[in-house]
Image (cartoon, helix red, strand yellow):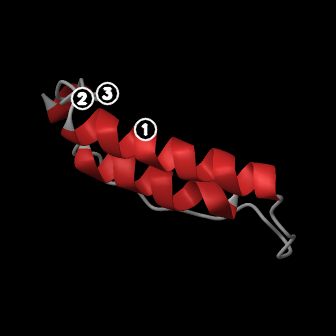
Amino acid sequence: MTQRFHLTRALFLCERLGIRVYGVPADQDQTRISLRGLARDIFASLKAFSDIFFLKPASPVPLLANEA
């Protein structure tokens, strides 16, 4: 559960790491995002993209014993 403008990036990161996820937006209303917030989200999305495709993170560690 996260704010709507974080949701797409969070789902992308988890799915690329092989984690099955479902996203639930926490926003109750459609509030306007500020220009600063929009710029921050764009740069955060670019960083997420580069983290996955250029830094190539290691496989996630299983959280449950039966996932090993």
23 and 10: which one is in front? 10
Q: Crowding at label 1, few (<14), some or many (≥20) Cα neighbours within 10 Å? A: few
Label 2 environment density (alpha carbons within 10 Å; few <14, some 14–19, many ≥20): few
Q: Amino acid at mark 1?
A: Lys
**As rendered, which of 36 and 19 lies closer to the eye?**
36
Percent position of residue 35, x then y: 79, 58
Work out whether mark 1 precedes mark 3 in sequence or the reverse, and give the earlier one. Answer: 1
Q: Secondary structure at mark 2?
A: loop
Residue at 18% in and 30% down: 56
Q: Amino acid at mark 3?
A: Leu
CA–CA distance between discs 1 and 3? 25 Å
Residue that numbered label 1 is attached to: 47
**Which residue is the site of mark 3?**
63
Query: Where does the image place residue 38, in percent across and percent down from the top left?
Result: 69, 57
Q: In this picture, is 49 found above or below 61?
A: below
Q: Name the quadrant of the C terminus.
A: top left
Instruction: From the image, state whether disc 1 or disc 3 is nearer to you.
Output: 1
Residue, x 29% and y 52% (percent of image)?
15
The residue located at (26%, 39%) in the rendering is 52
- Asked whether 48 or 59 is in front, the reply is 48
- Above or below residue 32? Residue 52 is above
Task: Decide if residue 7 is on the left or right side of residue 26.
Answer: left
Indicate which disc residue 8 carries: none
Residue 58 seen in this snapshot: yes
Residue 60's disc is: 2
- Indicate the amino acid at tag 2: Pro
Q: What is the CA distance from the residue labelled 2 to the residue labelled 3?
A: 9 Å
Is residue 2 visible in the rendered image? The answer is no
